[in-house]
């Protein structure tokens, strides 16, 4: 299930064409300070994220953002310090 479509009530498999529906792992760096957020997105949402940029994507996915903040342990990892 695509993490973004899930909260928009969209049928991602139908949208992408059932055979081509595939989930891709993406990492957001700006949603929660100090953490990276791992999401699984369908091809279409991944493309949206790419073209819109992270900030706009998060604004358009308020429910997803709430979900991530309430379930940090399943989405977030502590951001590694660059050395
Ligand atoms: Zn999607």
Image (cartoon, rainbow, N blue to C red):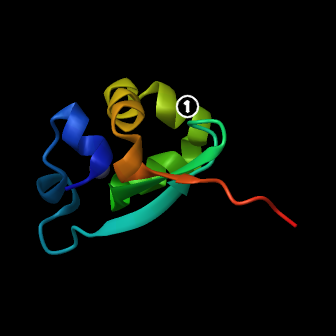
Count of marks overlaid on the render: 1
Which quadrant holds the C terminus? Answer: bottom right
Which quadrant holds the N terminus? Answer: bottom left
Residue sitting farthest toward the right: 83
Of residues 15 and 65, the one nearer the viewer is 65
Q: Is residue 49 above or below residue 62?
A: below
Q: Position of residue 64 (x, y in %)?
A: 34, 34
Q: Position of residue 44 (x, y in %)?
A: 35, 54
Q: Position of residue 50 (x, y in %)?
A: 55, 52
Q: Is residue 1 above or below residue 83?
A: above
Q: Is residue 59 above or below residue 6?
A: above
Of residues 78 and 64, the one nearer the viewer is 78
User: Label 1 CB, ligand 1: below 8 Å?
Assistant: no
Q: Position of residue 40 (x, y in %)?
A: 35, 58
Question: Which residue occupies 35% across, 56% down?
Answer: 41
**Mark 1, secondary structure of its residue:** helix
Horizontal side, residue 2 vs residue 62: left or right: left
Horizontal side, residue 19 vs residue 8: left or right: left
**Label 1 packing within 10 angstroms: few (<14), some (14-19), many (20+):** few
Question: Which residue occupies 21% across, 67% down?
Answer: 21
Residue to which mark 1 is pinned: 56
Residue sitting farthest toward the bottom: 19
Horizontal side, residue 43 vs residue 16: left or right: right
Q: Is residue 1 above or below residue 70?
A: below
């Amino acid at each position: 299930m695509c993490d973004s479509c899930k909260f928009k009530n969209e049928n991602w498999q139908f949208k992408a064409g059932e055979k081509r529906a595939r989930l891709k792992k993406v990492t957001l760096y700006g949603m929660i300070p100090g953490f990276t957020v791992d999401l699984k997105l369908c091809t279409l949402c991944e493309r949206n994220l790419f073209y819109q940029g992270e900030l706009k994507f998060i604004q358009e996915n308020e429910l997803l953002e709430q979900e991530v903040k309430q379930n940090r342990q399943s989405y977030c990892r502590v951001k590694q310090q660059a050395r």
